[in-house]
Every structure is written in C-alpha cells, then in structure tokens.
Image (cartoon, rainbow, N blue to C red):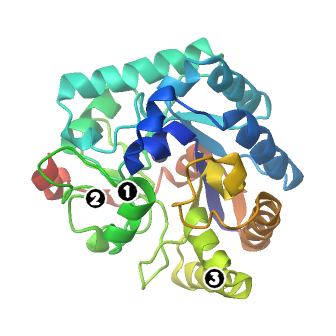
Amino acid sequence: MSTASVSLDLDNLWAYLKTHGDPEWERRPSFLRTAVPRLLEVFGEHSLTTTVFVVGADVERDDGAEAVAAITAAGHEVANHSYGHEPWLHRYSRAALEVELMRAEEAIAAAGAPRPTGFRGPGYSVTRELLEVLAERGYHYDASTLPTWIGPLARAYHNRTAPTGGDRDLFGGFARVRAPNAAYRWRVGSGLVELPVTTMPLLRVPIHGSYLLQLHQLSPRLARAYFTGAVGLCRARGVQPSLLLHPTDVLGAAEAPGMAFFPGMAVPGARKVEFLGWVLDTLRRHFDVVGTGEHVRRLAGNLPGRDTGLLARCG
Ligand SMILES: [Zn+2]
C-alpha cells in the first residue's frame, strides 16, 4: 500500500487574530487546552501517528508545553513551525532565521520532545537562506510549500495584514503552480527533502482540512465528493498525499472567540470531528498513513532533485 501523511499545524487563537489584524491577539488567547485533547482523541480513534508542527512562543507557555508532552506521549512527531509564527518569515535575514529556529527548538526540547527534524514555515514560502539554515541545523525536511494557484484564497485563511510594502510575495513567492505536488530534494546543503502540502492533482486546488470544512459549510455532500475525488486523483496520478490539518478543524465558533470571520467556523465542533473522522478513514482505506517525518524517511532514497535557483525572487 502506498504511503500518505497527515500533519497538524498547531496554530493558536492569538496567531489567527494577529494575522486578521485583531488587537485582541496581544493578550495571547489560546485554545490549545480544548483543541489538543480533542485532536489526539480523533487520531487515537483512527490509530493514526501524525506530525504536529508547533509554534515556539506557545511551547514556552504552560498550555503549549503540556500539549507537546501529550503529543509526544501519544507517539506523534513534534516538528518546528517557527518561534513567532510570522507569515513574512521569508523576509528575515539569515541571522534572524537562525534565532527563530533556535528559540523554537529550545522550547520543544524543554517541553521534553526530541529535537525537531522537520520545519514548516507559517507563510507557505521558502527561500534559499531558509533551506540553507535548515540544512545546517540538521533538519531532514521542509514542508512549507503549497503548490496551488489560489494565492488570494490561501491568504484569506491566514493573512489579512502584512508589513508595508505589500504582500505580493506571501504564499509562495515563486510560480507555485509549477512547483511540484510531490516530494523532491533541494540541491542545497546536505540535500534537504521538500514534502509539499498536497493539492488536488491536475487542478491544483487545496484539499487541506480548512478548505474541506469551508465546502462542508456549503454542503456536506459536496465536501465528501470533493475529497473522494481528490483521493481518486492522487491514486490515479501516483501522488502520495500529505494532508494538512489545523486546530480549527475540530473547534466550533464558541471555542474560538473572535474567529467568526474564518472559513468553516459555522460548522459545530462535533460535526467537524465527525467529518474529520470520515476524511481520515477515507485516506486510510487507500493509503498507509504516517506522519511527515516517516513519510520523508520512506521516500528518501528515491527523490528527484530541484535547484534553488528558482527561489531567486524571494531569496
Ligand atoms: Zn501556521
């Protein structure tokens, strides 16, 4: 059976409010104590081992450290989702990138998890500098790319604000639609593996949890037909899907105060849990589902190379 992976970006309530431009974010509201036990329960019910990309600033707090301990105890991989969850991380200098990575690594280690070997940036973008710093720091893989043409839509999920100068280079910064939808090896440093967040083969539209829930809000039947179609296309095209989830995929509007703006938030938490269970069952029917680190390990011997020259525009 072919391999697929499931990963979770543990974005917290404050991070969504911050990118939405809501000053309430500065109080750092958190929904981790609601979301994490619920997600771990869903993963446990479906006997899934996943990878959770955590934000260092959260892991330094009690609820984030508890989350990392529970995630590790349940056998999941903990990976690095940056320290401060700045969507414009790709504009950071090399020294600032090193600090971002190091602070998150230290928080993860202090919470009792192994040193992370995987990274996903908060803005779905990579630069040559980022890949070089990751390789130097001993990372095995990056999972930051989202090969879709729907940039404005992706931006609506995560970013309503950006530093002056525009956000044209957010969510990719290079021709994302031409970026591969399957894993490859960067020709940089020690040969870091890139595991893209899978989009629908051929159509290159998103298939991650938040997008499916937005469809579910319109029509549960449509959402199921869409995901069934995506899995069918992945199988037909030989794409080993890497499915991305977020805490909001199991939370209702009352559990994420201030996030009524976010797609899919009209769906009650219990309905979301039920739908997520169906999504994971559907994936497991056709694939051996593991975390991203294990997915990369299984692929490692047999990957095409890709030059970082194409990253010049955002490097
Ligand atoms: Zn994130």
**Disc number placed over residue 218 in the picture, else none:** 3
Report if residue 294 is visible in the image.
Answer: yes
Report which quarter residue 91 is drawn in: top left
Drawn side of residue 86 relative to residue 6, left or right: left
Q: Work out whether residue 192 or residue 9 is closer to the camera in this orientation and state it.
A: 9
Q: Nearer the viewer, residue 173 or 140?
A: 173
- Between tags 2 and 3, which lies in front? 3
- SS for callout 1: loop
The relative height of residue 292 versus residue 34 in the rendered view (above or below) is below
Q: Residue at x 73, y 87 (%)?
A: 221
Q: Which residue is mark 1?
A: 145
Quadrant containing the N terminus is bottom right
Among numbered discs 3 and 1, the one appearing first in the sequence: 1
Q: Residue at x 56, y 49 (%)?
A: 258
- Tell me, yes or no, whether the two marked residues, 1 and 2, touch with CB atoms within 8 Å: yes
Q: Determine whether 125 is above or below 214 in the image.
A: above
| Helix, strand or loop at mark 3 | helix
Q: Determine the residue located farthest toward the right in the rendered image.
A: 45
Residue annotated with mark 2: 172
Q: Is mark 1 within 8 Å of ligand 1?
A: no
Q: x%, y% of residue 140?
A: 44, 37
On the image, the x and y values in percent for residue 251 come to 71, 53
**In what quadrant of the picture does the C terminus appear?**
top left
Q: Amino acid at mark 3?
A: Leu
**Which quadrant holds residue 223?**
bottom right
Which amino acid is tagged 2? Answer: Gly
- Residue type, numbered disc 1: Thr
Q: Position of residue 232 (x, y in %)?
A: 63, 84
Residue 146 as seen in the image, left or right of residue 55: left
Q: Nearer the viewer, mark 3 or mark 1?
A: 3
Task: Tell me the residue at 60%/22% (across/down).
Answer: 114
Mark 2: few, some, or many residues within 10 Å (few <14, many ≥20)?
Answer: many
